[in-house]
Image (cartoon, rainbow, N blue to C red):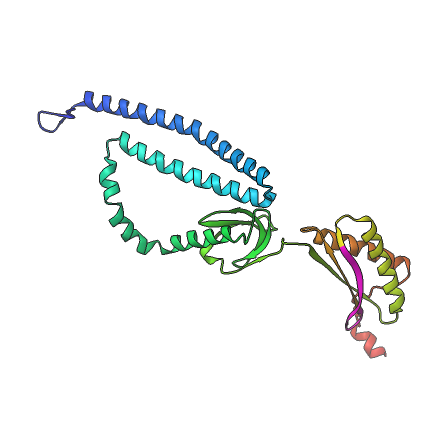
Amino acid sequence: MNLFEDGFQINLTEITELLITVGLKILVLLIAFAIIAPIGRKATSGAINRISRHRKIPEPRTKTLERLSINLFSYIMMFVFVVMLLEMVGIPIGPLLAGAGIVGLAIGFGAQGLVSDIVTGFFILIERQVDVDDYVTAAGYDGVVEEVGLRTTKLRGFDGTLHYIPNREISGVSNHSRGNMRAMIDIGIAYDENIEEAVAVLQRVCDDFAANDERIKEGPDVLGVQTLGSSDVVLRILGKTTNMEQWGVERDLRKAMKEALDAAGIEIPFPHQVYMEKKDIAEA
């Protein structure tokens, strides 16, 4: 194929044919990958779900493996696409692969963080430190795990923010989703009130929740006087709930206990402010 005629004169016919031929090949390649990619992701997801059902793998672990497998499939598809695209435009792959070792060595010195991410992510997955839908604290962030990858972990904060955490920054993980969770409530009563009566009222509320609320796994019980505040006696209530239900149980218990204390005529103290004007002081 001669792209130039008589020196540096451009052969427009050859260039047009080349562009059309290569363009058609690239178009076919794009269409093929647009069809194969969703089918492959769906097949990967189905395979992971079948294996999980057969081996009775917990749902959070299944979601973790499913999303990781889809990510790996996407990376492989991207690599294959780039290789085929280079072949189509006439760039030989052999020399590139031959030089990959030297280039990889040079890049490796500048990509130590990436290697650290992958190694740390591998051990996070192997040791099952976190799974999708777990509530965790990692790298200074609190939230629910949305995805665990070999390079990054995605954490959804409770304000809706999605945190992308490089795995190398996860030096420790606090997983709040392994087992039942604690519901703890502190309620203050006035110093003039009868403590035993207040404890009895609150315990009746706790017993009612224990008997009728499926979220409660243990307790709740009134432990007794926790602290003596500047204007109140603080009583502590403690119980165990289903994972991720502790906040809802605490809100419902506070509401029910407030209503029970009001019905019993037991005061819950609140701050008071007294305003004095200058003329009132002079008259006094």
Q: Is residue 229 magenta?
A: yes
Where in the figure is residue 164, as x and y percent of width and height?
49, 50
Q: Residue 228: which quarter of the image?
A: bottom right
Which contiguous range is marked in magenta?
A: 218-233
Is residue 35 rendered to the left or right of residue 278?
Answer: left
Q: Is residue 243 magenta?
A: no
Report the residue that reaches farthest toward the front.
55
Question: For the point 44% across and 49% down, which residue is it?
Answer: 151
Is residue 213 rendered to the left or right of residue 122?
Answer: right
Question: For the point 58% across and 41% down, which residue is it?
Answer: 55
Q: Residue 98: which quarter of the image?
A: top left
Is residue 95 rendered to the left or right of residue 52?
Answer: left
Image position of 219 with respect to 51: above or below = below
Report the residue that reaches farthest toward the left.
6
183, 118: nearer the viewer: 118
Where in the figure is residue 52, as x and y percent of width and height?
57, 40
Question: For the point 27% across and 45% down, which residue is it?
Answer: 100
- Asked whether residue 64 appears in the rendered view, the answer is yes
37, 232: nearer the viewer: 37
230, 210: nearer the viewer: 210
